[in-house]
Amino acid sequence: MLTGGGDCPGLNAVIRAIVRKSLTYGWECIGIENGWKGLMDIYTRPLDMNAVSGILQKGGTILGTSRTNPYKSDGGEQKVIDNAKKLGLDALIAIGGEDTLGVANKLAKTGFKVVGVPKTIDNDLNGTDYTFGFDTAVNIAMDAIDRIHTTAESHHRAMIIEVMGRHAGWIAMHAGIAGGADLILIPEKEIKLDEVIKVMDDREKRGRTFSIIVVAEGAKISESDQKNSEMVLQDQKLDAFGHVRLGGIANLLAEIIEKKTGVETRATILGHIQRGGSPTAYDRVLGSRFGVHAVEMVKDGKFGRMAALRGTEIIDIPIEEAVKDLKLVGDDFYDVARTFFR
Ligand code: F6P
């Protein structure tokens, strides 16, 4: 098994479940270190019962991770296939998000025996109602919003809290609704400054002298308000999957809002705090269920497929279905959140 892409609370629950379930079939498990990099360079470690003891409550991944993309190296695909043979792997369980599973999908098309487990705090993978890690991130963000509420109220300030969510606003929506945000800004809906200011004005008229605004890192200010309506980047570097480093929309908004309204405004960027630390019970259980199901998929020869949550059931779907488009926040859910934008 390998864990790829950004780390995520609950990864160790999946690893533990895969090992425990595999042992019931008498199989031997090997951990590939640092995602696809470990399969390109052959870095592995044996995973037995003791190796996965005491890891359930730990954040991160005991296997390490990377954003290595074998398809970005000459002959990378063949190297992965050859190295898997060298290691004597009968099957690979790839635990990751759109990038890691995108690689798994391409490999599966060559006949490589791989199954997928969906991981991302962003919850933007298609075909599964939830990915593990998301619930932990939402709870961390909600706790931060609760804390920011009290200081916002004391200082009569507008507070802007930036959460993760590159293309999808799931964390912003869930944490924002749970934390009683006055406004939630997400990548799926362009930010209209007039609407932001109207909410703040209306609140002031009602005697509410503070505002809590949650913004997803990938949200953009509308073109009519800002000449270059682009995502706010930390720098221009791209990772092996062509992703930029986002971050800073909260700072930009704070500056604009303070200028336009005269209300003292502060920005807080939660960043990687959302990905660190112990997983919630929900993520431990979901990760454990995905891990057990992935082993069943290997046993049944269901390669090229990914474990997924539908309602309360764990099912499996083609990896292709999960990676072809991202799962975005829909209008219905956004309309629910709008009820509270005041
Ligand atoms: O893909 C998950 C994610 O947490 C995004 O929300 C965020 O933009 C990105 O990872 C950050 O990645 P890194 O850890 O490489 O900075």
Image (cartoon, rainbow, N blue to C red):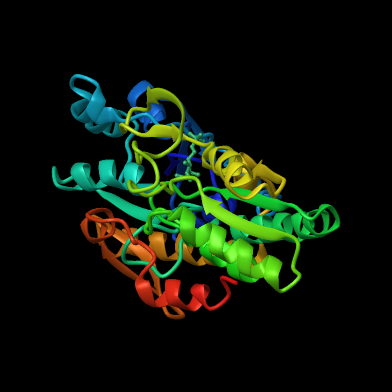
Question: Quadrant of residue 250 in the image?
Answer: top right
Residue at image coords 59%, 51%: 9
Q: Residue at x 46, y 80 (%)?
A: 312
- Residue 72 image position (x, y, % from top left): 25, 25
Q: Is residue 52 visible?
A: no
- Please provide percent x and percent y for residue 84: 30, 34
- Above or below, 338 against 33 in this view is below
Residue 279 in which image quadrant: bottom right
Foreground pick, 88 / 205 = 205
The location of residue 255, given as percent across then percent down, is: 59, 38
Q: Most extreme residue toward the right, as rendered? A: 154
Left or right relative to 72: residue 239 = right
Q: Residue furthest left?
A: 110
Which quarter shows the N terminus?
A: top left
Nearest to the observer: residue 298 or residue 109: 109
Q: Nearer the viewer, residue 307 or 164?
A: 164
Which residue is rendered at x = 62% and y = 64% of the image? Answer: 201
Taking 212 as reference, is 94 above or below it? above
| Position of 246 relative to 293 (above/below) | above
The count of marks equals 0
Closer to us: 214 or 25: 214
The answer to whether one can see residue 204 in this image is yes
Residue at 32%, 62% (x, y): give it: 126
Q: Position of residue 317 (x, y in %)?
A: 27, 66
Please identify the quadrant where the C terminus is shown: bottom right
